[in-house]
Each structure stands twice: as structure tokens, then as C-alpha cells.
Image (spheres, rainbow, N blue to C red):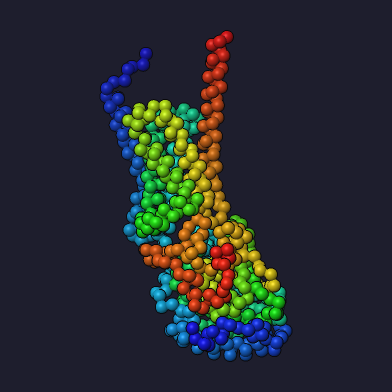
Amino acid sequence: MPAAPRAGDRERAKRWRRISHLALWGLSLTPAVVTLVQAFTNRLGFNPIETLTDRTGWWAIFHLVLTLAVTPLRRLTGWHWLVRYRRQLGLSAFVYASLHLGVYAFLDLGLDLSHLVEDVLERPFMTIGFLAWLILLALAVTSTTGWIRRLGKRWAALHRLVYLAAGLVSLHFVWGQKTLRAEPLVFTGVFALLLAARAVYAARRRRSRAAAALAEQA
Amino acid sequence: MSSTLERLLAVPESEVTPEELYLSRRTFMRAAAAVAVGAAANAVLGQEAGDELLGLGGTTETPTDYEAITTYNNFYEFGYDKSDPSRLSGDFVTDPWSITVEGLAENTGTYSLEEIVSQFEVERRVYRLRCVEAWSMVIPWNGFMLRDLVTLLAPKPEARYVRFEAVFRPEQMPGQRRNLLPFPYVEGLRLDEAMNPLTFMATGIYDRPLKNANGAPIRLVVPWKYGFKSIKSIVKIEFTAERPLNTWNVVAPHEYGFYANVNPNVDHPRWSQRTERRIGEFRRRDTLMFNGYGELVEGLYAGMDLVTNF
């Protein structure tokens, strides 16, 4: 008979969890810190603002991929503890997306608001990027336990918008290049695979539920 | 504008293809004498444009760092990233070099680079360069006017365009091996654009020979047009009656036109062209119509709709 977890074990598990979250934040934000140091030591090349824009965008997409990979990975490996880090990865994606938009609005455009508004309203490439950021903003705001409780079932529906964000981000990345490039297409393909995995799981769940219902009837 | 300049800009067709320059390849050298006359006129033009050292249309703005000019480049033959041309162009061999002249001209044939360059007195032109991606530089070029070369090649009266082709050597150019664009890169100008005294054939920057990353050993510089018109590492010049294709227009016709004149009022579909970032500066600056060379080139486009002919 397995021993009931003692209070000390629970404390230790909690502490470990806290440390692991901090470590993950550390990992996620390392590129930002490195970039900041490079910015202040003048090592971002001859067009530093362009470098900042490209890099923050890249890390936003990278974290979005990690976020969406959690559930399929969990199913594949049975590592259910992964889900504890999903929210944090999503928030990191939002942080980098905000830095990306911030660099563009503050540093590149020098807060020329009319230019920014014109970009968002008149240039579909910019519009979809901005929409993706709005979605991430909404998801970040509603990512707290309080909001999860308050929204109930609607929370899951709302947070499925992350796939729309992934689609918009993919298009923004592919379109942002002067020619069709491999890297944005690879990211797009990975997003598509992750979405397909979710669809497969959902279909399987539906099928097994239907089978269970049939078995009950018999 | 000075009367000399006006006279030179309004070149009558008979002067573009003078009958007496009805030459064979053998007499190419003799035509150089005609260019010497042109060179004298250029000296006058240079002085009238301001500082003689800056050359015609020369700007007194601070030239961009040599390091930036030679390591921040778009040259897809070597790669997509700005640092690729300087990092990956080590295998590119530019000596010996020759240029083949084809099409509607009297003096078609293949000429060695020395044969061509030795015909002209190399001069300096400090030009603004405005990339279609909304960044810009100030570059002190060395070279000669394209019009002098065109005069030597003696286009026939039917010739209305000049087509340029860049080198195709996948074994020396990693971007060509990766098929980043449909290579060889091609560009074109209307003949009168080619004959404008601003249009320049560059063989150097900062009084040093062109680096591979900048389009060694010889490239075009058209300062009132977006940078992609200024084709690098030229191996072929062709005179045509029909408007030639240009690579970026073929790749993305809605984004890049044939004319590609710098125009703050016509935006790229994905970004505004109203402002630009000068490399080395933090704040954006306003983009100028024809990149600030309107006085010297706007006559070329009189009555033309520059929105549809972007």
C-alpha cells in the first residue's frame, strides 16, 4: 500500500515547482536579456532596430510553437506535468509579441501614431500581425485562475483562438519576407501539424465517447 | 538648372546615335575620342552641382561608414541576409572580367573590363542610396557615366531600352545555388534614363575597388531609383526595342515595378515609403521625391502617372 504523501513531500514538490517555473522564465527571457546587452554594447549590426524587430518576432513565434506543442507532447509521452508550463509559455509568447510591436511602434516609428494607425488599417500584412497580438493580449489577460473560473466553459472556447493567432502569425511571418523563404514555411508547417494533432485527438475522443454510449445501450 | 545641363539633358536623338559613330568593334577605341569631349562637359557639370569632388548631384551629407556600406547589403546571389554578401562572397572571382554587348547597337561584342574602363576618366560621385526596404545610405562611388559607355556602343535608332544582366555562377555564389531568385538577375532602363548624366557605372567605393559584396567589379548606380535597379556584377548589356523584364518585377509584380523611382507618395503594399532610416541614424527621416534628384530627372517622366508606373 503506497504511503500517503507527507506534508514535507508536498512542501518540497511545491518548492521544486516554483523553482522550475523561475528557471523556465530565465530560459525564456535569456534571448531578450542577451539582445538588450548587445543593444547597449552596439552589437546588433548596422540596422539595430531591424535586428530587434526580427528577433523579437522570431522568439514570439518560437514560444507560440512551444505553447501549442504542450498538449500533443503530453499525449505522446504521457508527461502530464508538462501542462503546468503551458500558461507560462503562452505568456512568454505574449511578452515577445509585445516587445516586437513595441520596438516597431516606439523605436522604428518613433511613436508616429498616424503612421502606426495607417499601417494597421491599410496594410493587410500589418493588420494580421496586429490582430494576432490582440488575440494574445486577450488570452494573456484571461490566463489567470480567476478568469478561468469566471469564464467556465467559455474559457476553453476563447483560448482556442490561439490557433487563429498561430495562423495569423504564420501568414505575417511568411508575408514579411521579400521572397518565399524556408524558415517561415517550416514554422507554418509545424503549426499546421500541431493543429492536426489536436483535431485527431478530438475526433478520437468523440469516437470513444460514442462507442461508450453504444456499449451502455447494449 | 544651368543651361549646359539643360542642353545635355535634352539630348536629341541624333546625338544619342550619331551617324559618324557608325562603328564596328574595331573602331570602338576610336569612339573614345568622342567621350573625351563629353568628359570636359562633365567637369563643368560637377562644378555647377556644387563641390567638384562630389561630382554631379553630389550631396554634402556625411557618407555612411565604409564598414556599413561593405557589410550591410542586399545581394541575393550570395544569400538572403544582409551579412551574407560580405560573409559568403569569398569564392567569387572577378578577374578576368568581360562584358558582352548585344542587341540594337553598332558596337556589339565582348569587351574586357580593362578595355571598357580605360576609355573613361574615373570620377567620384557621392550619392544617396535609397533601398526599397526603407533604409538608406550615402555612398561615395567611383566610376564613369553610363551615357559615355552607351555613346561608345552606339545604339541604333530603334533601341529604346537597355537591359543589364548580372553574372550567373552558382559554383561561386551560394544564393544562386539556393535559387533565392530566378537567376541571372536582370534589370533595365529606358534609354533616356540610361543617358541621364546621373546614371553611373561604379567600379569603386571610397576610392577603393568595389568589394564582392557591393557588386564587383562593375555595377550600375541609378540614385533616383530604389536600390534594386542598380544591378551588380554586370556581364551583359543589351539594347532592345521592347521593355526588358526586371527580376523583382517578375518575382512580385504588385510590389516592385519597372520604373521603381523613389517616391514617398507611392507606398509598398506592406510598408510606407514616406520615411526611411539612414543607416547610422536612430530617427527616421523623410524620403524625398526621386530621392532628392528631382531637378535632374523629373523631365524624364513628364506627363506620366507615377502611381501606375511605380
Residue B170 picture quarter:
bottom right
| Residue B61 in the image, given as x and y percentages of width and height | 40, 75
| Residue B158 in the image, given as x and y percentages of width and height | 71, 77
| Residue B166 in the image, given as x and y percentages of width and height | 62, 68
**Do we see residue A58 in this rendering?**
no
At a point 53% along the width and 88% down the height, the residue shown is B4
Q: Along the line of sight, which residue is nearer the eye, A154 or A179?
A: A154
Q: Is residue B219 above or below residue A191?
A: below
Q: Is residue A99 above or below residue B181?
A: above
At a point 66% along the width and 75% down the height, the residue shown is B160
Q: Which quarter shows the C terminus of chain B?
A: bottom right
Q: Residue furthest front?
A: B303
Residue A93 picture quarter:
top left
Q: Along the line of sight, which residue is nearer the eye, A181 or B187?
A: B187
At a point 57% along the width and 67% down the height, the residue shown is B305
| Residue B182 in the image, given as x and y percentages of width and height | 63, 59
Numbered disc total: 0
**Do we see residue A213 in this rendering?**
yes
